[in-house]
Image (cartoon, rainbow, N blue to C red):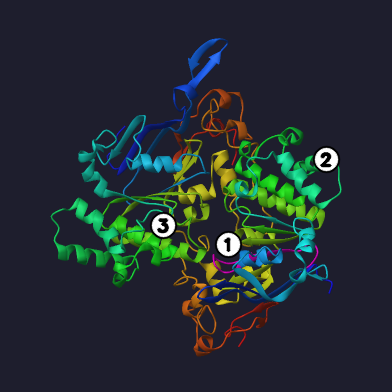
Amino acid sequence: MNHLLEIRDLEVRFALRSGDLTAIDRIGFTLEKGERMGLVGESGAGKSVTGFSILNLISKPGYIAGGSIFFRGKDLAALSPEEMRSVRGNRISMIFQDPMMTLNPVMTIGDQMTESLMAHRKISRASAEALAVEKLQAVHIPSPEARLRQYPHEFSGGMRQRIVIAIALLTDPDLIIADEPTTALDVTIQAEIMDLLLELCTLKDMAMILITHDLGVVSQVTEKIAVMYAGKIVETGSTENIVARPQHPYTQGLIRALPGSREPGSRLYQIPGSMPNLSAIPKGCAFHPRCERAEEVCRREVPELLKRGTFQRLVACHLVGV
Amino acid sequence: MLEKSALVTLNKVVKHFDISGGFLEQLRFKGLRPRLEQKKVHAINDVSLAIEPGEILSVVGESGCGKSTLARTVMGLYAPDSGEIYYENTRIDTLDSTQMLVHRKKMQMIFQDPYASLNPRMTVRQTLEEPLRFHQPSISETEVRDRVAEVMEQVGVNPVWGERYPHEFSGGQRQRVSIARALMVDPEFIVADEPISALDVSIQAQILNLLMEAREQRGLTYMMITHDLSVVAHVSTRVAVMYLGTLCEVAPAANLFETAKHPYTRALLSAIPKLGQKKPRHIKLKGEVPTPIHLPSGCVFHGRCLYANERCRREVPRLLALSSGVQVACHGVEEGRVLD
């Protein structure tokens, strides 16, 4: 067990009055030290829930119903809340979509940074501040000493997200989970933030899970991809490989639906219908009602995530490689 | 100045928002002398633009550049502080609301968030019937029914669902209803403000296709506001790039994506993440977007521009027409300092 992170048969459910909903249905993947992975899918696919469950941040009525999350050999799902706290924000950090929601509006940047450091380490205030300055420099914030005394509203959106990244980096984590880190930002800022994340990951040999719906961003930053649909991983493999030759009809559809893959002005390829509600996931392959190639077996049997066909990757589709 | 062929013409439109607040908030002391200070957001500064019939003009730019304000000003939702707006040959920014009615029917708008733009207490049928009854009070009951069914069919919403409420639909379906509402009164010109930004990737393609189909079937003209440049490249015929309330470049879509002239346009285009492009190779801009409250002197972009010189800091560049229908507002391009 030399993986940095190994998720096995993870199942997350939400206990509702009408019965349990399965949000994550027995997924598994591994991540090595310094490896960058993209979790791709549309809203409701379960990609954020996956990110949250790694940090045990699933709140009621949600719960982890089964499976294990091994991080550096320890099962995170079995840790006590205190033990978990020493991992969360320390060895594993998370970056969220909206920096304004992450930062406390009534605390200075400096206070927020030192607070997080002093919670995890026995460290004096002065040395915590010195470290905060160093991290702000690492995310290219000019005159960091002066910036420490400022409040979040005094920064622009791009700067705020840099600060959030600086806070995530404070404890030099082994893994950073970035949940749609650039969705709330403009394209030029998005490009800067992605450059920054990539730079920091390579510099510190830090692993990253990038949760996003944007295949363009994923293809630039990550080494491997897991495509999720209705709580399951439907295809996973190297980024280059999947982008060039997607095998699952859903991945193919996502890529073909991107503007820019066709002659300007022509009709875009469209996947019919929309993502099913978690309370009404279709029998058999969850994607079959939207799939052009669906056959009898797809309506009946749930396809397993297996190595299928000639390419180096796992696909959950009956029709691949037969 | 009036171009006969254009459907919508904007001439030197300016829109500022006063944010100085009440008397006490404006009150400042210089030494011991009290004086009133006003603060303004310079949302649109001297924008001239002609939209030809049948085209899809996309207005692109980052958040806060004034593109949505421009859309709303064109629709008459905001009155411009100065400048003129023409629909065909009629000046519409000075019309009162009764005189404007005729034009409102020809100009419709689609909004970004289909969760906020539909009345949650009205069924889809009521939402769709309302504009029709308002603009054509004499219309008969059967005509209304037929028209609703026809438009619903066209946008791909089953007419049987007319009695349902918006919450019963998904985001993509709601956006179809919003589009249907705009199409009900048979408009000529549609302003779409970020019509797909709130939708999932697989749904975006459906809505874009729908907009393109509606244009072909009905001969519509679009003004599309968006920040998604790959969408722009796919659907538009012409693109207007905005920065801090000012037009930097207006060019046919094909030209823009191949040979962008303005330094800001180039930086913007280089930032699009492309599928399968391994190393992101984008042009890095200096600094941050300045606030539209205190506009930079001269060219609004000069503080971040790699090519800026003394003239750029002093003199506001005008939008100059180059060959091949490209218009650029840049001293550097004019002087040949900014090379291809």
Question: Any magenta on residue A45?
Answer: yes
Is residue B86 visible from the viewing direction of this image? yes
- Mark 3 = which residue? B114
Residue A266 drawn at (x, y percent): 43, 63
Question: Mark 2 belongs to which subunit?
Answer: A
| Side (left or right) of A1 relative to A103 | right
Label 3 neighbour load within 10 Å: few <14, some 14-19, many 20+: many
Secondary element under disc 3, as helix, strand or loop, is loop
The magenta stretch spans which residues? Answer: A32-46
Secondary element under disc 2, as helix, strand or loop, is helix
Secondary element under disc 1, as helix, strand or loop, is loop
Q: Are marks 1 and 3 in contact (CB under 8 Å)?
A: no
Q: Closest to the observer: B283 or B98?
A: B98
Q: How many marks?
A: 3
Residue B19 drawn at (x, y percent): 46, 30
| Side (left or right) of B175 relative to B302 | left
Label 1 neighbour load within 10 Å: few <14, some 14-19, many 20+: many
Residue A252 drawn at (x, y percent): 56, 72
> What residue appears at the point 29 percent right and 68 percent down from the top-left corner?
B163
Question: What kind of residue is marked 3?
Answer: Pro
N-term-proximal mark, 1 vs 2: 2
